């Protein structure tokens, strides 16, 4: 079963959820604020997404800005970045769609359209 990791108040997450529902794509919904992905899950997601760990940071979020991560991330190791991401769901870019062999992070219409083709 697909897992849709989102934040209820996020407008982008709402658009992504509508996309999934409209296209009859089954999923289990998981609230990122209540159930943040673990370090191990994030590592797996990053590898399945073929994206850099930086793509998983919510760079427009308040927590990201408060922690001054823009300046700190370039100096951090991959493991350190994973550790930081796993501490707070508000640091993680959303939505995340976890499929059997692929992970989509953020809602990119073209990327998600490719799911239904």
Image: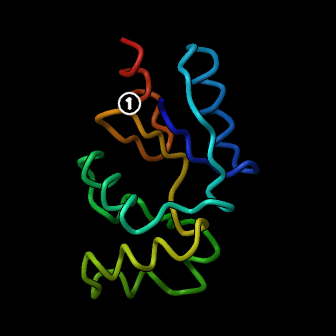
Residue 77 appears at what percent x and percent y?
25, 82
Residue 8 appears at what percent x and percent y?
73, 48
Residue 1 appears at what percent x and percent y?
48, 29
Of 1 and 56, nearer the camera is: 1
- Tell me which residue sits at (59%, 24%) in the image: 19
User: In the displayed structure, would residue 76 be above or below residue 15?
Assistant: below
Q: Is residue 75 left or right of residue 72?
A: left
User: In the displayed structure, would residue 13 be above or below residue 17?
Assistant: below
Q: How many marks?
A: 1
Hey, which residue is sitting farthest right in the picture? 9
Residue occupied by mark 1:
111
- Tell me which residue sits at (63%, 20%) in the image: 21
Quarter residue 33 falls in: bottom right
Q: Quadrant of the C terminus?
A: top left
Of 112 and 33, nearer the camera is: 33
Quarter residue 81 falls in: bottom left
- Tell me which residue sits at (29%, 35%) in the image: 101
Label 1 packing within 10 angstroms: few (<14), some (14-19), many (20+): few
Q: Is residue 65 left or right of residue 11?
A: left
User: In the displayed structure, would residue 117 be above or below residue 64?
Assistant: above
User: In the displayed structure, would residue 110 be above or below residue 13?
Assistant: above
SS type, badge 1: helix
């Amino acid at each position: 079963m697909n897992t849709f990791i989102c934040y209820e108040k996020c407008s982008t997450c709402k658009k992504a959820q509508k996309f999934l529902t409209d296209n009859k794509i089954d999923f289990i919904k998981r609230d990122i604020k209540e159930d943040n992905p673990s370090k191990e899950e994030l590592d797996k997601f990053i590898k399945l997404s073929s994206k850099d760990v930086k793509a998983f940071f919510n760079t427009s979020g308040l927590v990201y800005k408060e922690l001054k991560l823009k300046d700190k991330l370039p100096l951090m190791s991959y493991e350190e970045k994973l550790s930081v991401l796993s501490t707070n769901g508000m640091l993680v870019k959303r939505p995340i769609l976890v499929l059997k062999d692929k992970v989509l992070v953020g809602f990119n219409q073209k990327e998600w359209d490719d799911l239904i083709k």
